[in-house]
Image (cartoon, helix red, strand yellow):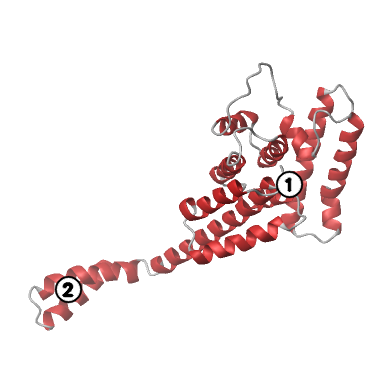
Amino acid sequence: MAFNGKLIGGIIGMILLDLAGMPFGALWGFLLGGILGHIFIDHPGTLEESTNEHRAAQRQRGTFIYHLLCLCVRLAKADGPVNRLEIQFMEQLMRQRLNLSERGRRDAIRVWNNAKNSDIPFSTYAQAFYRDFAQQRHRVLDMLDLLFALAAADSTRLHPAEEELLLRAAGLFHISRLQFDRIKARYFAPPAQSGPTWSALDPHYALLGATPADSVEVIKKKYRALALKWHPDRIQARGGAADAIRHAQEKFRQINEAYEKIMEARGQKR
């Protein structure tokens, strides 16, 4: 006959508390011992697993906040120097939504200032974020939503430079134009004029760092530069890790797909 932890712990607790002369000691001992036996005998790793899960969740939260700060500061600088309203928005975000302690707030300010003074482009930060959170779709959509909220903090109209970066982020995050417009509509009213202002090719242009106004030659030049940079063979030749090679393969595929879609729409052969 197999005895589980509840039963073993209950019997031990019943004996100990009964010998101690406590009122109803046998009953209380059995109940208390059953609980402890279930935790430490049936599931000895429960507390450790819970602690590890909590630590992992905290690390993931910290990683998300780091990417958020880096992307926000690059977006805030797209239309000029970071202004008072944008700083106020970030202060409110850190205190109310992110619930950062004073120490966490100081660390966040340090990350913000480092990214502010860095020459790393917005797209590089966006790629790093997507690499870490590609499997968590709700996090990806939440990031784009927060970026739109920052863009709306100092204006009721979306600045073209900010919109270009947000479109580029949508392309890198694999967010459809329909989802992009739905998020945008939460913060900015649609333009008064009628007529289409976008096309399904916009994310593809953003991925290549190009615009619909660019000539075919300019687009080809940008495509070739990106294809060379992300070619998996080049990454492998440099001794890249398996994860880096897989990431390069996916990036290379996206670049080629974007280029083919644009060239096809323009009636051009590859």
Which disc, if any, is residue 29? 2
* Residue type highlighted by circle 1: Ser
Kindly state the secondary structure of the residue where label 2 is placed. Answer: helix
The answer to whether residue 117 of the structure is visible from this angle is yes
Quadrant location, the N terminus: bottom left
The local crowd at label 2, few if under 14, some if 14 to 19, many if 20 or more residues have their Cα within 10 Å, is: many
Q: Is residue 163 left or right of residue 217?
A: left
- The residue pinned by badge 1 equals 123
Q: Residue furthest right?
A: 217
Q: Residue at x 77, y 53 (%)?
A: 245
Whether 52 is drawn above or below 152: the answer is: below
Left or right? Give the position of 86 relative to 95: right
The mark nearer the N terminus, 2 or 1, is 2
Residue name at image x 52 percent, y 50 percent: 93
Residue 1 visible here: no
Q: Residue furthest top?
A: 194
Q: How many marks?
A: 2
Q: Amino acid at mark 2?
A: Gly
The image shows residue 203 at horizontal and vertical percentages of 72, 33
Name the quadrant of the C terminus. Answer: top right
- Within 10 Å of disc 1 (Cα), the crowding (few <14, some 14-19, many 20+) is some
The residue lying toward the viewer, choosing from 140 and 80, is: 80
Nearer to us in this view, 252 or 199: 199
Separation of marks 2 and 1 at Cα, in angstroms: 62 Å
Expressed as whole percent of the image width and height from the top left, the position of residue 179 reads: 59, 32
